[in-house]
Image (tube, rainbow, N blue to C red):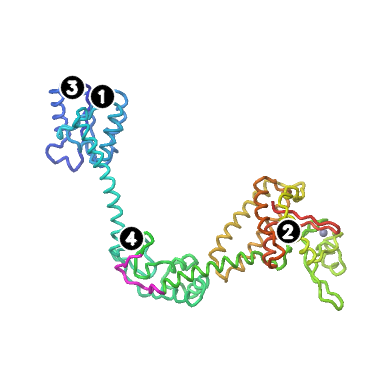
Amino acid sequence: MKVAIYVRVSTLEQAEEGYSIGEQKDKLTKYCEIKDWTITKIYSDPGFSGSNLDRPSMQQMIADATTGLYDAVLVYKLDRLSRSQKDTLYLIEDVFQKNKIHFISLSENFDTSTAFGKAMIGILSVFAQLEREQIKERMMMGKAGRAKAGKIMAWSNIPFGYIKDHDTYDIDPLRADIVKDIFKRYLEGTSITRIYQQLNEEGHIGKNVKWSYRTVRQVLGNATYTGNVTYHGKLYPALHRGIISKADYDEVQRQLKIRQIEAEKKFYAHPFQSKYMLSGLLKCGYCGATLKINKAHRKNKPPRWRYNCPNTQARSHAKTYAHKNINCPFKLIYRDEAEDMVIREIKKLALHPDSVINVPTPKQHDHINTEAVKKELESIKRKQDKLVDLYLIADSLNLDDLNKRSQELKSQQKALEAKLGPAEKDDHNILEFKKALVKVKDIDKLSYDQQKFIVNQLIKSIDVMNDKVTINWNI
Ligand SMILES: [Zn+2]
């Protein structure tokens, strides 16, 4: 039988008797002589621990297992191979047995070629499993145990208002007062935006960097301030003292949820800055300009709103637009008539969604750099995505700004899409559009704001000529 000898000694064990590389080699060689086995290779890992298999000669032995270099592996003691049951089992089952290699350990009389040795593998696997579970349990016990004992987690950041003291926190009186103040202001109804502005106006005391929306929000959501530690979403009474009462903290969490829902509602109710349903959507069918709304004063009658092309030389606008030297033939369209017509068209389409396939798409424009326009469109869409994120955390103070910005981006997007000409009417777009349509069958019964929202969702632009109106659907 061709035998490979494996010897190992860790730096710590080297002093101990019987464990030196020389002694291990000596005993194993003698044993082979008695058995009349041939030693084909000696694998030696001096100064390596047995806690893992990351040892040069061990790796070489594993690699050689498939080459037929040896029929058996001989070690002095089982723990020379590995100190982990899991690794031992891996070597015996996945490396040695798979390649029909026997494994013999001298001290324990462990020989996988015998019936007893085979039974030992089964026992070994049970212990390996136990070992894996024990490691897991120890890790879990570590964290859960700390939480149950009220100790802070080793990796957590020290919350503003506390100083770390071994396993717990001490109160930092100056900063703790600021934390109390943040909770108080929020409970009095001050918005997060206003709170961080106020704190910065007051000189962000106790803090090197300025307060931001994020950092104030973090303070308001940190349960550590109630004198508890959090582990897996559960609170445990902590060793450190609280700064905020549990009742106040709970009330703040409730308020945070309510105010976020209100911000979202506001966003969906007033997504566009423009007052009128079709403002920004109506385009002059002759020159492409966006139609502008103005009031038509009438004798003895209430004024009527109408849309005009800014490039027409209407009498009242002659001075304003004369310098542009364009005389557009567009006359006007009344606001109420245009709105009624658009709602009728949406209703008609919603009742017959299958006719969608035949609706006109925006007309083609020549001489444009398609790639550049597409690139710009992508960047605008990214900005819009970011805006939506902001909406979700916004409070009343900055909603107006966001609305304005959203409107700007939307008009930029529309202008660019108009340049690109007809969007490819792929099946997916048509399906999405139909889905949206089906929901708005009763558009004529909705509020003006709701109608405005739907119109802006469904319609890209409307080309208006004196005798013809073309709706460009947002497919
Ligand atoms: Zn015009």
The residue singled out by tag 2 in the image is 347
Q: CA distance from mark 2 to mark 1?
A: 84 Å
Q: Are marks 1 and 3 in contact (CB under 8 Å)?
A: no
Can you say whether 356 is above or below 148 in the image? Answer: above
Q: Residue 286 placed where, x, y %?
A: 83, 56
Q: CA distance from mark 1 to mark 3?
A: 11 Å
Can you say whether 360 is above or below 321 in the image? Answer: above
The residue singled out by tag 4 in the image is 153
Q: Is residue 221 left or right of residue 454?
A: left
The residue singled out by tag 1 in the image is 70
Q: For this rendering, which residue is in front, 325 or 28?
A: 28
Q: For this rendering, which residue is in front, 369 or 377?
A: 377
Q: Which residues are magenta?
A: 235-247
Mark 2, secondary structure of its residue? helix
Label 4 crowd (10 A; few <14 / some 14-19 / many >=20): some
Mark 1, secondary structure of its residue? loop
The residue singled out by tag 3 in the image is 37
The residue at 42%/69% (across/down) is 207
Q: CA distance from mark 4 to mark 2?
A: 59 Å
Residue 175 seen: no
Label whose residue precedes the other's in the sequence (4 or 2): 4
Mark 4, secondary structure of its residue? loop
Mark 3, secondary structure of its residue? loop
Query: What label does residue 312 carry, if any?
Result: none
Label 2 crowd (10 A; few <14 / some 14-19 / many >=20): some
Label whose residue precedes the other's in the sequence (4 or 1): 1
Q: For this rendering, which residue is in front, 146 or 469?
A: 469
Label 1 crowd (10 A; few <14 / some 14-19 / many >=20): many
The amino acid on which the numbered mark 4 sits, given as a three-letter code, is: Met
**Viewer-nearest of discs 4 and 2:** 2
